[in-house]
Image (tube, helix red, strand yellow):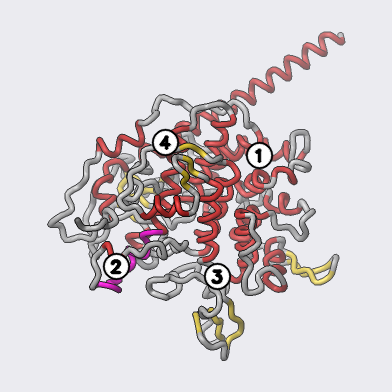
Amino acid sequence: MIYRSIIFIILLLSTCNSIIAQNTSELSDKYVNYRNRLLEEWIIVSPEVEQFGVNIPAVDRILDSLGNPRWVSWSDGNSNFNHWLGILSTEYRLLKNNGQDYQETLSMLVYTMLALERLDLYSEYTLRKHHKTESFKTEYELIKYPEDINGFLIRDDVSLGFWRQYFRHFKSEYGWHNKTGDGTNRYLSVFQKGVIAKEGMSQDNIIYLLQSLALVKTLVDDENISKIELNFINDYIPDYLKTKGILNGKTISFDRWVDDLTDRLVRRCFHEYPEQEVVLKITTGKAHPSKTKFGGIMSSYWYIANPVTNDLVAEGNGEDMGVWMNSYGIAEAGNFITGKQSYHSDGSEKGLNAYLFKALLFKNLKFLKHGGFPVPDNIDDYMFRALASISDINWDESSYDLLYLLGDKRLGWTYEHNPLILYLLHTEKYKKVYAPGIEFYENDKKYYQELLGFAPFNGPSTDYTRIDYHPFWSSSSRLNWPNNAGNRNAKDVRDYAGMDYMFLYNLYRLVFEPEAYILPIDRRNEIVTKSAITYPVPELKGIDAEFYYLPPKPEK
């Protein structure tokens, strides 16, 4: 009888392991399909790293009645770099830890980091050209090095020139030029048409970018890049990387690279004396840089401005004192990523700044040790949560409350990537309460596995007539916008790149199932060479349009 019981237990355990393995295999197959789909239809991966638009993924598109894209969008810049860098850094770590070839992943990671460098260097050039602020100069003279590498980035540079060359890659048509001649009706980018054209990054763009950069620093080693094809138009970017010790011979230091990018991004969020403060005045209800505080309710050096126009960026600029509200978290994120204690400014490390950040994050306006006023749940705190996940912001350093807060499973508050990111960035602390055998951990493992299982095999969609439609996966990113779940539309169908699934899947694997991570190797070198072969340089001359195809180079 005892032996029969033992045999039964062994068979039961074997069956459970088989089911788990089968589920993991299905999720892995889905990831591979999403990955292939992303590379084949949603992004141009290219070693021509200074060409506008390359190495930035699109996010969503509208399909016609035949299922062909009739409109492709790069969205507002919040998920593009955050998700793609997160995918690549986690994929790199999983492949390397499992003894797999990670060269393609490393190449795409380098290309994406260089896309950020391209935006940092050429954003001011683009705006000077767009606004004709220095029309007496040649185009090449509109680039100012090294001062333009300063952390100010427009959200993307997906231009008409890029679209003219690569529209077929996105399974679309070229379309009709718009009235301003800088885009067509077949694609949408912030570069072409944001709140304003060539719109600068807002604070949420920067915060999400800091989150993904923290993962890059934690998960990616210094690497030899001698096998990676890199083609530059000008010497500015490689010279800058060499000057900063980021590129040393053929070795790239991701630690130094992330530190340097973080330093630039954080310093775009605050301004030091003698620069002007942004002053909130009761007469306008919005804050603006002002030389006088007369009539002001409050003032702060925390805001984001466009260095070419000297105006606040169009959105998320601090005119509602929002950058000041996030200042404690932004500075703490900068300090954690770089290991320096140099980013608190204008009192952001103490007093009201620190107190309000924590009070709004934990929904508790404490006024006594064991008392306080609850903060309404409908105050959206997604930026607070993202920043807290980077630097482990609790009421006090020894607390584990943040992990449970970020693990909130209520509808509309399920920013599921944040607790896993917190764990990966602060593993030594949280492995004490989040480990195999602990109920919270085991319940989360099941939750993530089931959630990933709900994702449609062929990508998220609003088409509720599809047999694999699921409301949990019907938006551009359930991670960044959980309230958008449940989109339903069978007429003007939207489908999405699915980077939210890919990012969450890799985070899940790193935290819960880090072993036996394998990707097919049959597409090596296909992606990076296809663009040059399939999509030749387009004809741009003689067409009344503004292409922004390549940055200028010195005239011979």
Where does label 4 land, which residue? Answer: 226
Which class describes the residues within 10 Å of circle 3: few (<14), some (14-19), or many (20+)? many
The circle on residue 130 is 2
Q: Earlier in the sequence, mark 3 or mark 2?
A: 2
Which class describes the residues within 10 Å of circle 2: few (<14), some (14-19), or many (20+)? few
Q: Quick one: 213 or 358, which is closer to the camera?
A: 213
Where residue 223 appears, as percent x and y from the top left, is: 50, 38
Magenta span includes 320: no
Where does label 1 land, which residue? Answer: 447
Q: What secondary structure characterizes most of the magenta part?
A: helix
Quarter holding residue 454: top right
Q: CA distance from mark 3 to mark 4?
A: 38 Å
**Tag 4: amino acid:** Ser
**Residue 464 seen from this side:** no
**Tag 1: amino acid:** Tyr
State which mark lies toward you, 3 or 1. Answer: 3
Q: CA distance from mark 4 to mark 2?
A: 37 Å
Q: Is residue 163 left or right of residue 361?
A: left
Q: Earlier in the sequence, mark 4 or mark 2?
A: 2
Q: CA distance from mark 3 to mark 2?
A: 26 Å
State which mark lies toward you, 3 or 4. Answer: 4
Q: Secondary structure at mark 2?
A: helix
Where residue 120 appears, as percent x and y from the top left, is: 42, 59
Which class describes the residues within 10 Å of circle 1: few (<14), some (14-19), or many (20+)? few
